[in-house]
Amino acid sequence: MKAYRFDSFDSLDDLKMREETDPRPQRGEVLVRVRAVSLNFRDIAILRGRYPRKALPGFIPVSDAAGDVVEVGEGVKSFQVGDRVIGAFHPRWFSGEAPSTVLSDSYGAENDGWLCELKAVSQEAVVRMPDTLSYEEGSTLPCAGLTAWTALAGPVPIRAGHTVLVQGSGGVSIFALQLARAVGATVIATTSSARKAEQLRALGAAGIVNYAEDPQWGKSVRALTGGRGVDRVVEVGGPGAIAQSLRAVALGGEIASIGFLSTENPGIDFFQLKGSGASFRNIAVGDRAGLLDLNRAVAATGLKPVIDRVFTFDQAKEAFSHLESGAHLGKVVIRCMA
């Protein structure tokens, strides 16, 4: 099979394609022919040394994939050859409390990921892909889709009448916009682009704030809610955005902390945090049970993931570069096999 590996993290040129021995499924495993993978900011963060966990070179990158089961190992009961599946971001977090190894188990940093033609994994590490989606669309669910679902679904689920703030136009933010609108919630979005503002409105955002033109965008978001604030902030900006998120959130609302897109870290004002009256929940994508719930919601609502661009397997470096440019809206996908 063909597979990509980062020989080092010095530059994107260190992403090398090579021929490798085809894997075979062991007992309890399925062999997946990878049809498509989707990229996340995490993949760029690992390359640029900004990932907050240990990341080692030499592994196959990318955490999210969709494909077909082409062979099953001894004892496999959950799947059969021909099933269309997507991988779980956390292959050993099934439900409830996360295992202590949840972060080190994930793909692409300390274990081989999915940017390859074939991959053998435990039958518990994949779920069936919604029939309504293409492979390219299905590959966007494991990280971005599930992260947005986890941010909105609990412990107090977002519902009609609530207001949600999404930041920017990356995969998690677009999924959160779509999922929140699907349950009747109002969505306010931030962006720095007039072009993307129009696209966000077309997707259902009721209000747009340009954070590049308005450094105090948190106050502007609050003003759009009549001064009340938003019920949920899907916080992907991280240290450089948290102060404004605290200004935007309603008393008793929640900031679902997900990303670390910003590079500056001015720190958090304790009294602002305390005075906000909001709760702060750290999101680590989500478990397998949540991915199953998301799949059911996608199938029931007809939700279609927003894909900015699909690259071929030979264009993997170009796909990484496009994601890093920030020009995308939604997900960047690599088609591994037609």
Image (cartoon, rainbow, N blue to C red):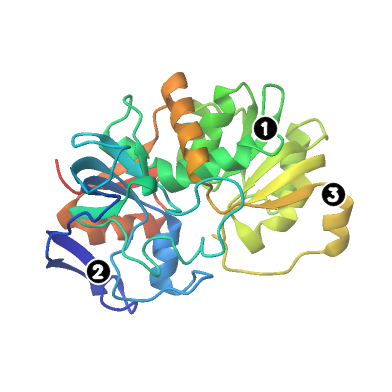
Q: CA distance from mark 3 to mark 1?
A: 20 Å
Of the residues under marks 3 and 2, which one precedes in the sequence?
2
User: x, y percentage for residue 261?
Assistant: 54, 60
- Badge 3 marks a residue whose secondary structure is helix
Q: Three-letter amino acid code at disc 3?
A: Ser
Q: Residue at x 42, y 72 (%)?
A: 48
Q: Quadrant of the C terminus?
A: top left
User: x, y percentage for residue 254?
Assistant: 74, 44
Query: In the picture provided, is 4 more to the left or to the right than 276?
Result: left
Is the residue under label 2 in contact with that under label 3 (CB below 8 Å)? no
Q: Residue at x 72, y 52 (%)?
A: 244
Q: Is residue 194 visible?
A: no
Q: Is residue 30 visible?
A: yes
Q: Three-letter amino acid code at disc 1?
A: Pro
Residue 279 vertical placement versus 224 (above, below): below
Is the residue under label 1 in contact with that under label 3 (CB below 8 Å)? no
Q: Which mark is residue 253?
A: none
Q: Residue at x 25, y 54 (%)?
A: 120
